[in-house]
Image (cartoon, helix red, strand yellow):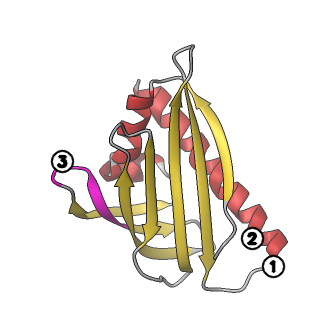
Amino acid sequence: MADTSTQSIVIDATPERVAAVIADFARYPEWVAAVKSIEVVEEYEDGYASQVRFVLDSGPFTDEYTLQYEYAEDLSRIEWSLVAPSKMQKQQDGSYDITANADGTSTVTYSLAVELAIGMIGMFKRKAEKMIMDTALKELKRRVEATS
């Protein structure tokens, strides 16, 4: 099992608005730099995506994979796991936990555990995870605040 990394960011929007942007997979290519295409493969009865296929290109790394999503009833937690190993990943588990703050903002905590299919020295893997999480949270914040 891969080690889990966690980071948080405060976003100037309600938890409902943050969750709506996270769950709007079709628009990811508009605001997530590494995402080249998205396909919602399956949906739950309520219309939320249950399986989503991603095509990523972040320069030195490219990958195609499908994630299985689950949602808390109030959308305060959105979690996912890798459906099957890909070219770059053996396993991926992650989540967004979204909490309301008294001032009307939301704190988003992103947790990610990835087991790569390629060998990588621990120090470089941790640095890559930090960069991925920093970028993901900053892109999310920019998108949510721009569309609020």
Q: Is residue 18 above or below residue 94?
A: above
Circles 2 and 3: CB atoms closer than 8 Å? no
Q: What's the residue type where badge 1 is placed?
A: Ile
Q: What's the residue type where badge 3 is placed?
A: Asp
Q: What's the residue type where badge 2 is placed?
A: Lys
**Residue identified by numbered label 1:** 121
Tell me where residue 12 appears, x and y as whole percent.
Answer: 54, 23
Circles 2 and 1: CB atoms closer than 8 Å? yes
Cα–Cα span, label 2 and label 3? 37 Å
Tell me where residue 131 appears, x and y as whole percent.
Answer: 70, 56
Which element carries disc 1, helix, strand or loop?
loop
- Residue 74: quarter of image: top left
**Residue identified by numbered label 3:** 46
Which element carries disc 3, helix, strand or loop?
loop
**Residue identified by numbered label 2:** 125
Which element carries disc 2, helix, strand or loop?
helix
Q: Which residues are magenta?
A: 45-53
Left or right: residue 9 versus residue 147 is right
Q: Residue furthest top?
A: 103
Q: If you read the primary sequence from the N terminus, does the residue marked by circle 2 or circle 3 appear first?
A: 3
